Amino acid sequence: MKRKERVSNPSTGSSWHPFVRRRHLICSMQILAAALSLDLPGAAARAMPRPGIPTRAAGDERRKKDSHAADFVLFGTVFTEQGLALHGAEIRVHPAGRKKPHWEARSDRRGEFAVRVPRGADYELNVTANGFRGETRQISASNDNRRDMVFRLPSAAGGKSK
């Protein structure tokens, strides 16, 4: 009986045997993984905690979900004078009375941004962009959970707008 030779794959340069079906092996592994992840009735009763792996307490999930419950969200949109969304505008937020920004963000391609700050304080929000005059606003984060703002930045004198 004559031995079969390996056939090389010209596109990848690797050699493979014509009778090996890697595709079938991968499909069978995917089917096995899907079968193991099925939620069968009674499977929860049979599930045993594994030694060495800590289980979560009921309060841990609530604490994780509520970690930002007391935060205040500053949400805004930055436009040019012509009403076009301003991509890449820098947003800096700091507590009132301080000069160094504590939170920073950039507007996305739709000109939108969101900054999460602790509730119950006064903040100063500064929006700047290359070729445009910046704008500063005082914000009180004591009421509600969110503040929506719209900024229309005028072109800087002698500057190029985007």
Image (spheres, helix red, strand yellow):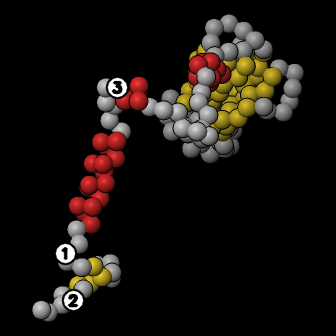
Please provide percent x and percent y for residue 145.
62, 12
* Depth check, front residue: 49 or 107: 49
| SS under mark 2 | loop
Say which residue appears at 50% left-offset and 29% top-offset. Answer: 83
Quarter of the figure with residue 123: top right
Find the distance from the CA under tag 3 to the CA under tag 2: 52 Å
Residue type at mark 1: give it: Phe
Residue bearing mark 1: 19
* Depth check, front residue: 161 or 139: 139
Please provide percent x and percent y for residue 86.
56, 36
Quarter of the figure with residue 87: top right
Q: Is residue 87 visible?
A: yes
Dot placed on the residue nearer the N-terminal end, 3 or 1: 1
Residue type at mark 3: give it: Gly
Say which residue appears at 86% left-offset and 30% top-offset. Answer: 99
Relative to 31, is 155 on the left or the right? right
Residue bearing mark 2: 5
* Depth check, front residue: 7 or 56: 56
Disc 3: CA contacts within 10 A as few (<14), some (14-19) or many (>=20): few
Dot placed on the residue nearer the N-terminal end, 2 or 1: 2
Relative to 156, is 162 on the left or the right? left
Disc 2: CA contacts within 10 A as few (<14), some (14-19) or many (>=20): few
Please provide percent x and percent y for residue 91.
68, 33
Residue bearing mark 3: 42
Measured along the vertical axis of the image, is residue 109 above or below residue 16?
above
| SS under mark 1 | loop
Find the distance from the CA under tag 2 to the CA under tag 1: 11 Å
